[in-house]
Amino acid sequence: MIKLAGLGRTLGAAAVIFSAVMVPVLKAQDVSDEQMKAARAAITAIGATNNFDNILPNLAARVKTSLIQASPNYEELINKTVDDKALELAARRADLEREAAAIYAKTFTIDELNAIAAFYSSEAGKKLLNNGPIASREMLKAADIWAAGISRDLNEATSKELEATLVPQTEAAPAVEQPAQ
């Protein structure tokens, strides 16, 4: 007998997770076609939704893992079935793109979206996207080194100043005489 006891629950849970990620949150009704076009161009130029490409494959992998753990004898069937169903759902990726475009369209003006798309489509914009994270990481390293030097110098300067100020006051303070017994 095929033991796919958790199949219904697992697929149901995956569907809930998937729909929670993919179901539109915003309504694009108050966004014009021109805004959406400009937003899509900006999103494409900056690769704003590229990080979402792995959502469906990751969800499919989780479903496979769960089902295979429950029924290891059916690994091949489970893999094929989940892959087939995931491919059927792949078309829904366009829903996420529309929602992302609507968010950008509501956040930026058409002129701003066009400027964003123009810049990030330029060689300088592409270079910023590719090398910006490297430059940011190097700047953080430089800031850490600078902060360590500033901390060292601040500690040394403060200690030196305080020693110069406090030592003479300590020496100048009258000694407290002990009462004779």
Image: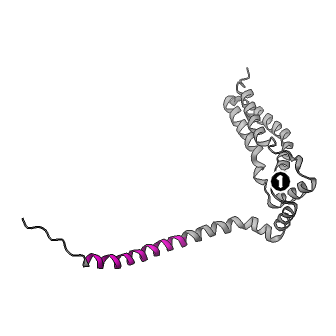
- Residue 88: % across, % down: 85, 38
Instruction: Say which residue appears at 29% left-offset and 77% top-offset.
Output: 169
Is disc 1 placed on a helix, strand or loop? helix
Q: Amino acid at mark 1?
A: Lys
Residue 111 image position (x, y, % from top left): 87, 64
* Left or right of 24 on screen, residue 10: left
**Residue picked out by circle 1:** 106
156 magenta-colored = yes
Q: Is residue 81 left or right of residue 174?
A: right
* Picture residue at 76% right of the left edge, 36% below the top: 79
Image quadrant where residue 66 sits: top right
* Nearer the observer, 54 or 105: 105
Q: Main secondary structure of the magenta part?
A: helix
Q: Quadrant of the N terminus?
A: top right
Q: Is residue 156 above or below residue 120?
A: below
Q: Residue at x 75, y 27 (%)?
A: 8
Residue at horizontal 75 percent and vertical 31 percent from the top: 11
